[in-house]
Amino acid sequence: MRRFGFAVGMLFGAAAGLFLAPRRGAETRRAIRAVGGELADLVATPFTELATAVGTSLRQRGVRPATLGSCEPTL
């Protein structure tokens, strides 16, 4: 839950910075892409860790890989 709060805070802070600091269009788009990439990484990491942990746990319990499908993230 802390990571979610951090991500939301980062998103609002980045949005405020983009709107309050005057830049040319190309510079603003680059900044938005950079923030978007960072936010995507921040959000994807916990889900990647969860998918890996679930896959490992199921394999340790003897669930056959054919019934699991892929536990790899799709991002």
Image (tube, rainbow, N blue to C red):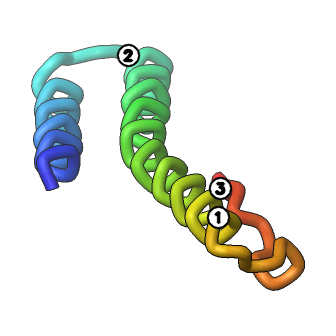
Q: Is residue 22 left or right of residue 37?
A: left
Farthest residue, direction front: 61
Q: Nearer the viewer, mark 3 or mark 2?
A: 3
**Near-viewer residue (1 or 68):** 68
Farthest residue, direction bottom: 67
**Near-viewer residue (50 or 24):** 50
SS at circle 3: loop
**Near-viewer residue (53 or 4):** 53
In the rendered structure, which disc, 3 or 1, sits on the residue that comes first in sequence?
1
Q: Residues within 10 Å of mark 1 (few under 14, many from 20)?
A: few
Q: Is residue 19 left or right of residue 71?
A: left
Where 74 sits versus 69, above or below? Answer: above
Q: In the image, what residue type sits under mark 3? A: Pro
Q: Position of residue 11 (x, y in %)?
A: 22, 41
Residue in view at x 54 percent, y 65 percent: 54
Q: Position of residue 19 (x, y in %)?
A: 17, 32
- How far apart are labels 2 and 1 at the CA level? 54 Å
Which label is found at residue 24? 2
Where, quadrant-wise, is the N terminus in this rendering?
Answer: bottom left
- How far apart are labels 3 and 2 at the CA level? 36 Å
Which label is found at residue 60? 1
Which label is found at residue 73? 3
Residue in view at x 38 percent, y 39 percent: 42
Q: Nearer the viewer, mark 2 or mark 1?
A: 1
Where 36 sits versus 56, above or below? Answer: above
In the rendered structure, which disc, 3 or 2, sits on the residue that comes first in sequence?
2
**Is mark 2 in CB contact (under 8 Å) with mark 1?**
no
